[in-house]
Image (cartoon, rainbow, N blue to C red):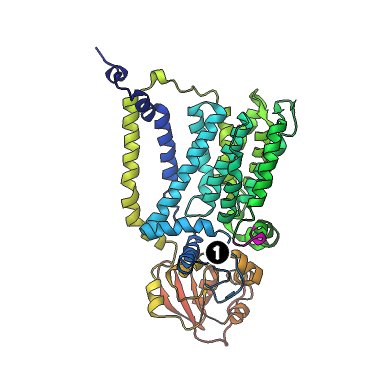
Amino acid sequence: MSVSVETIIKPNKKLPLLRMVFSFPAMLTVALLAIVWALSSGKANDPDIWWHLRNAEYLFQTHQLPNQDMYSFTVAGKDWMNYEWLAEIPFYLAWRASGMAGVNLLWMLLVQGIFVGLLYLSYRASRNFKASVLACGFCSFLAVVSFGPRTILFGYVLMVLLLIILERFRSTGRGPLWLLPPLFCIWVNAHGSWLIGLIVFGIIGAAGLVEGQWGRIEGSRWTPAQLRKLVLAGVATVAALFINPFGWRLVIYPFEFAAKQTLNVAHIAEWVSVDFHNTRGKFVLVLLIALIIAAVFRNCPWQLTELCLLLFALYCGLTYIRFLFLLGLVAAPILAKLLDFVPPYDPEIDKPILNVLFIGGLLFWATYSYPPATQRTLEDSLAQTYPAQIVPYLQSHAPNGHVLNAYLWGGFLIWHNRDLKVFIDSRVDIYEYSGVFADYLDLAGLKNPQQILDKYQIRYVLFPPDEPLHYVLEHNSNWKIDYRDEVCTLFERIERTSEPVATAQ
């Protein structure tokens, strides 16, 4: 005769807690986080993290924010605003605690927290835990584009909190709107994505100004009390944006970015549109097909609020892959509702022992794979992308002149060689405004390279071997190779005239 687990532990007064910890929903949650954890592996490389660490180090050493360029010779001393200063501090503290392994662990935990909040949002929308996990798992593949040690992750943490607060207010009328001003005060100091959050707040507020039904689309109007609370929260939120070290300059920065940084948007990879030929694009295509099928064949009502948010997120995500994470956050609760055909969780047929074994296996895998494996391999992984091997050489053979470095390596050199002034790094704003970024793009494209090299009095060039400029210098007698490895080559100019650098035809 078999004896059920429930019978064995029935006298235990802690049974409800045990059943919750070892329940099927808990197992699904761990499985979702394991998927996110697996997708996070190998995403530790981000060119911005290095100068973020240097900025935070400067803040801790001097107790003031940098207000001008200190890292380059091309824009040295020019005014510069450290617009993500607050998000840099946790990464720097993580680095002080455990080096790059600590930085890696921090951003991975941030991503995990985002998806826990997204799972909560999806469950509130669908009341189907299985469907919520499936929806969040699918959307995690959209979010991979922003995985890594990036300050924008703090923006997405705050975005999830914003969506939770506004969803609770919309559904119950009792959401803690008083949290919005401090939330946006933190957000404006952490990342420029606060403007996206403010637009989301505006969309949700505006959608509640109309009431009616248009086919399957339903809209409900705010009550006068709700509208009054929203207006007060909105005014307080806008006022809170100005609580920052830079005043109005920080508030207008996202608008300035959109208006002036055209080269940044045109040439940086994360600002390109979705390519439906690659894997990421195919996930977006599946999402679009699923939404179209649901709209055509499923007799499901659409709330005006969620439709407006989805259209906005689709525009952002399809136009710039950088915002596919945002699309995932908005789409997951909608997908969870559309997956209502998935059988809901039934606690009567739960199998706690199998759940315990499954959860234990996933936790063992996560513990085993990190931190020991990551600690051993993280430096090797970084050395495949950045010129790590040349750093000791540059310290013992200090360049006697200006060095032209590859764009993605500027931040790495800033952090690892304090005496070297770079040509450019990934702080695109200051370089675009001064014309340096345009000159760099011309150099990389072999457009008037000799004139630009002479303009900045470049004596050394540190570039990867797969760049056209590398090939040209390698076959130019006016340049010699001082150092070479698998990742980079350091060229030195030995003659300024006689043989010009080739120009692209």
Q: Secondary structure at mark 1?
A: loop
Expressed as whole percent of the image width and height from the top left, the position of residue 328 reads 56, 41
Q: Is residue 286 visible?
A: no
**Per the image, is 246 magenta?**
yes
Residue 68, placed above or below residue 500: above
Expressed as whole percent of the image width and height from the top left, the position of residue 12 reads 30, 22
Residue located at (48% from left, 68% from top) = 58
Residue 7, placed above or below residue 36: above
Residue 287 picture quarter = top right
Expressed as whole percent of the image width and height from the top left, the position of residue 313 reads 63, 42
- Residue density around tag 1, few if under 14, some if 14–19, many if 20 or more, within 10 Å: many
**Per the image, is 154 magenta?**
no
Residue located at (29% from left, 19% from top) = 11
Quadrant containing the N terminus in the rendered view: top left
Residue 312, placed above or below residue 442: above
Q: Which residues are magenta?
A: 245-250
| Residue hosting label 1 | 426
Q: Residue furthest top?
A: 1
